[in-house]
Image (cartoon, rainbow, N blue to C red):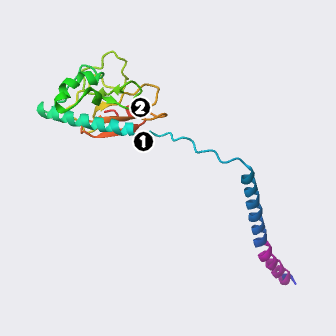
Amino acid sequence: MGSTKRETVLRAARVVVPLAAALGIAVWVGLSTRTHQGSAPAPPPPPATGPTTDRAREVCAARLAKLGEALRLYAADHSGAYPITETPGDSDVRLLPCLKRHGMTSGDFRCPTAGTAGGEPYVYHCYRHKGSSGWPNWMAEEHVVTRKSPAGTWLMSDYVLRDAPGPHSQTDKAFNYLRADGSVKLHVGRPREVYR
């Protein structure tokens, strides 16, 4: 009698358990559909927080690459030395006399994304001293670059304001920088993370 009872319970379980699972799934789908049908449409995804991919950023990178080529031509004529300025600022004024013969104009020294008229001048990282212009602590007091400098050494960069997004993003520090090997990189984050 005990084994017959057990067999009956097992047979009933084989039928009842799948039915209960199917019923539970049907109830869940029905409730889920009813909830979504009467609710407002889903909100749009939040705006991207990464750097913008606008044309101005590409133009900026192309300008820096062009400046890198002109600087390499200058260095080839000067025993591998890049022009050295007194301070990092005003690259459009300080470097133009050196690079004009290599096709550079004053507009080539400005980032097209920056908010000022014509764009903010690039910062030139081959200088004798920072001066007293409030440059950040992570920049070296003196920063002289030659063609023999390590590839990642900074030669020129976008102007990045403290406590503000970079010129190539509405939300993040995103900026381009030209390295001693002539490559141009986009960095998203604090400048000190990649400064050399």
* Image quarter (top left, top right, bottom left or bottom right) of the N terminus: bottom right
Q: Nearer the viewer, residue 137 or 58?
A: 58
Q: Is residue 148 visible?
A: no
Q: Which residue is mark 2?
A: 167
Q: Residue visible at 32% across and 38% down?
A: 61
Q: Residue visible at 73% across and 49% down?
A: 39
Where does residue 51 sit, x and y in percent of width and height?
Answer: 44, 39
CB atoms of marks 2 and 1 within 8 Å = no
Horizontal side of residue 155 vs 193, given as left or right: left
The reply to whether the magenta stretch includes residue 151 is no
Where does residue 23 sit, x and y in percent of width and height?
Answer: 78, 67
Horizontal side of residue 1 vs 105, given as left or right: right
Residue 31: which numbered mark, if any?
Answer: none
Specify the segment rendered in magenta: 3-16
Q: Main secondary structure of the magenta part?
A: helix
How far apart marks 2 and 1 lie (CA) works out to 12 Å
Identify the element where label 1 is drawn: loop
Q: Which residue is mark 1?
A: 53
Where does residue 108 sit, x and y in percent of width and height?
Answer: 28, 30
